[in-house]
């Protein structure tokens, strides 16, 4: 081949290579863009599940604090009556004390949360504010969980102490009887509210519940508030698209 033909061939080959490379880069760019769009579209769908989780959690927290406040009032009623030496009957005593001894736990709904976290779009830069809020929400939820475990364990330990001190014969036996009867009516002729309330462990449990309720309310309010912030951030993100 003559020299000028070789030069033209090389130029043509180089041009073809450049065109192929450019084509590949464009294809990769389009593919990456499509993948990001698909991930974001999937994320938007997952957001709805996440919001449903947060709304469900918010309702559960509202019911929990409402119940806690109600039980706390009952605990306060027992303490006030004892301090003022006012007797109440056995049925009323059992109805007010039993809920104080019941465990209460917030059980987080997080199926939608986990879907959002698992999405590849979760790590995108535009998700930063939502990502931080979700992480903060889960941290508050974990703190609440630790608090409730500690609280329920403390009440259980006090129950064991009172039973070990012979208090089972006066209070806990009545609760055991309640498990095997179809009525909540008690007519123990030896029931003495003021004498029963002289037990320091029982008073501690009642006082503790009054104090714990205020702490629990703070945790519930913090989690509800953070959940609302997540929902708002998601709504702002979706409205910007």
Image: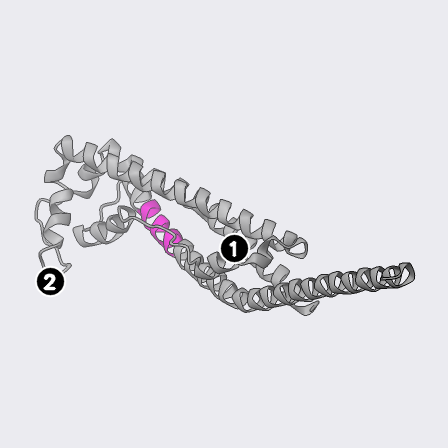
Q: Indicate left or right for 46 with 211 as reference.
A: right
Residue 68 colored in magenta in the image: yes
Q: Which residues are magenta?
A: 67-77
Residue closest to the eye, 157 or 191: 157
Under circle 2, the secondary element is loop
Q: Quadrant of residue 166?
A: top left
* Residue occupying image coordinates x 58% and y 64%: 39
- The answer to whether 186 is drawn above or below residue 213 in the figure is below
How far from the left and from the top, in percent, is residue 101? 26, 46
Q: Which mark is residue 184?
A: none
Q: Position of residue 226 (x, y in %)?
A: 56, 53
Residue most extreme to the front? 1
Image location (x, y in percent) of residue 35: 61, 64
Q: Is residue 227 left or right of residue 62?
A: right
Q: Position of residue 210 (x, y in %)?
A: 38, 43
Residue 35 against residue 142 in the figure, above or below: below
Per the image, the residue denoted by label 2 is 182
* Magenta span contains residue 146: no
For label 1, the SS is helix
Residue marked by disc 1:
117
| Residue found at x 86% / y 60% | 6
Characterize the local packing of mark 2: few (<14), some (14-19) or many (20 or more) Cα atoms within 10 angstroms: few
Q: Residue furthest right?
A: 4
Q: Is any atom of residue 140 visible in this view?
A: yes
Please identify the quarter of the rendering in which residue 146 is found: top left
- Image-based side of 117 in relation to 158, left or right: right
Mark 2 and mark 1: span between their CA atoms?
48 Å
Closest to the observer: 134 or 92?
A: 134
Q: Main secondary structure of the magenta part?
A: helix
Q: Quadrant of the N terminus?
A: bottom right
């Amino acid at each position: 081949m003559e020299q000028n033909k070789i030069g033209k061939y090389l130029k043509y080959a180089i041009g073809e290579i450049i065109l192929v490379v450019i084509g590949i880069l464009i294809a990769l760019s389009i593919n990456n863009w499509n993948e990001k769009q698909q991930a974001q579209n999937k994320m938007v769908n997952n957001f709805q599940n996440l919001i449903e989780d947060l709304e469900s959690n918010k309702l559960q927290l509202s019911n929990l604090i409402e119940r806690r406040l109600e039980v706390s009032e009952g605990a306060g009623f027992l303490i006030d009556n004892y301090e003022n030496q006012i007797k109440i009957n056995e049925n009323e005593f059992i109805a007010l004390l039993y809920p104080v001894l019941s465990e209460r736990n917030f059980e987080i709904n997080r199926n939608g949360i986990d879907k959002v976290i698992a999405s590849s779009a979760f790590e995108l830069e535009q998700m930063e504010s939502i990502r931080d809020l979700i992480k903060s929400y889960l941290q508050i939820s974990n703190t609440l969980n630790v608090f409730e475990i500690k609280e329920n364990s403390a009440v259980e330990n006090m129950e064991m102490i009172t039973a070990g001190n012979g208090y089972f014969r006066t209070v806990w036996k009545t609760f055991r009887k309640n498990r095997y009867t179809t009525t909540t009516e008690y007519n123990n002729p030896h029931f003495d509210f003021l004498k029963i309330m002289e037990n320091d462990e029982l008073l501690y449990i009642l006082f503790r519940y009054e104090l714990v309720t205020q702490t629990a309310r703070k945790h519930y309010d913090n989690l509800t508030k953070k959940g609302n912030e997540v929902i708002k951030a998601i709504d702002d993100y979706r409205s910007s698209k």
